[in-house]
Image (tube, helix red, strand yellow):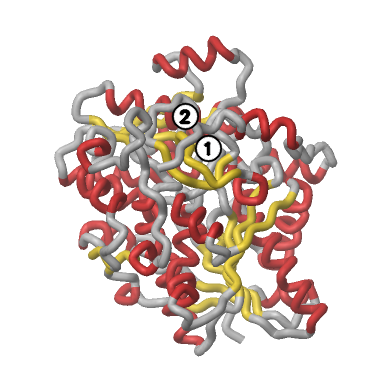
Amino acid sequence: MNHKIYLTEDEIPKKYYNLRADMLTKPAPMLRPDTKQPVVAADLEPVFAKALVKQELDNDTRYYDIPSEVRDFYKIYRPSPLIRAYNLEKALGTPAKIYYKYEGNNTSGSHKLNSAAAQVYYAKTEGIKSLTTETGAGQWGTALAEACSYFNMPLTVYMVKTSYEQKPFRRIIMQTFGADIFASPSNTTAIGRKMLTDNPDTTGSLGMAISEAIEKAVTNQNSRYVLGSVLNQVLLHQSIIGLEAETAFKKLGEYPDAVIGCAGGGSNLGGLIAPFMRDKILNKKNTDIIAVEPKSCPSFTRGKFAYDFCDAGNLTPLAKMYTLGSGFVPSADHAGGLRYHGMSPVLSQLYSDDLMTAEAYTQNEVFEAATLFARVEQILPAPESAHAIKGAIEYAKKCTESGEAKTILFGLTGTGYFDLVAYESYQNGTMIDYIPSDTELEKSISKLLKIHP
């Protein structure tokens, strides 16, 4: 009985896979907010490294070579294992086979390091002297701090205020790797000061933190901004998760009937599903692709597919995505990495085309699943990852009801060792399930720009 399927170092992918090349309906282009015309490279190069701009705008190149320096960095913690959750299967009494791709074998405890290494490398090779970013739960900020330390690149991180306060140890790790950290919104940027004036008691949001990080980048010479989710380039880099999983399943002689991932901005989900969605688009397989999000921030399940700003300060180009409105501020729940108002344009288009489905759960439902998983599989999952666990459990229950021995793959994208306050809240019964009302969502969504390109 083999619990873990390991690949060799030589089997770490040598190329990133660009799912957009095989999509029948391409994601809608980003638009300049002033002219409503599609952005071009010159619009993005003041913000991002040129190589990343090329990847961001490229809907046609199927594969990108992974630079040898990045691949050498990956070898520190990759390939990551594909693990059979035998004990979870037994606890559920299901005929389904449940596998998870475990991305927690690095200091950041998450998949975020995959894109962080690539983005820092490209910036370094172009002579960029410093980087800025935002972080929600802290996994992205930690991962980027690691990568910046490795490639000797200064970093400034704007961390969503509620996570900054809930997870001080995340901040300490980032500082250990040399990053400067600010709770967002802060008084270090003009947009941050405005947000604090408008709402002094705000708990912050990823949209707010993005605005501050972008302002910091564009107002400092030879500095650039990097983002850990949502963007096309990030999904490209994260495709190594799905490509490794595909190789592991080939070794097993199996193929997943369902691929399930948590969804905040879309980085891990987009990376995990990439080769399996490709096969679905090309009519080679008909795998169920399922996104799982929190009911407190239901971009897919209750959002609108429309053009919107990617940040709360309206500094970014407009992206067509499932969104709750850039001004939406989610409740200060514990799945900080899923508290983003919108969803990746790539995933949004796939969802609109009915190539994937989405589910939403409350915090208590998710932590119930996380606790069961921890007890039987001996890994404490991050709250974000626990959404995927909940989705996998519900799918496995359906297999029990139908008697079908389907194969399930879900993404375990991070560990929960910095989320013990959340686990304590669940255990002592003080965890609150906040679900925004239709009125609250309509107030935010109604402010979306009316754009018909």
> From mark 1 to mark 2, how far is it between C-alphas?
8 Å
Which image quadrant for residue 223?
Answer: top left
Image quadrant in which the N terminus is located: bottom right
The crowding category of the residue bearing disc 2, from other C-alpha atoms within 10 Å (few below 14, some 14 to 19, many at least 20), is many
The crowding category of the residue bearing disc 1, from other C-alpha atoms within 10 Å (few below 14, some 14 to 19, many at least 20), is many
> Is residue 164 among what the camera can see?
no
Of the two numbered discs 1 and 2 in the rendering, the one whose residue sits closer to the viewer: 2
> Is residue 348 among what the camera can see?
yes
Q: Position of residue 128 (x, y in %)?
A: 19, 36
Q: Amino acid at mark 1?
A: Gly
Residue drawn at x 50%, y 34% as measured from the top left: 450
Task: Tell me: 200 left or right of 266.
Answer: right
Q: Amino acid at mark 2?
A: Ala
Residue drawn at x 55%, y 57% as measured from the top left: 352
Image quadrant in which the C terminus is located: top left
Rendered view: 205 above or below 237: above
Rendered view: 282 above or below 421: below
Secondary element at image label 1: loop
Front residue (pair 154, 94): 94
Task: Tell me: 329 left or right of 405.
Answer: left
Tag count: 2
Rendered view: 235 above or below 329: below
Q: Which residue is mark 2?
A: 209
What is the residue that sits farthest to the bottom in this orientation?
253
Q: Position of residue 360 (x, y in %)?
A: 70, 52
Q: What's the mark number on residue 136?
A: 1
Front residue (pair 156, 53): 53
Find out whether the residues at labels 1 and 2 contact each other: C-beta distance under 8 Å: yes
Front residue (pair 44, 233): 44
What is the residue that sits farthest to the front in this orientation?
452
Residue drawn at x 34%, y 76% as measured from the top left: 11
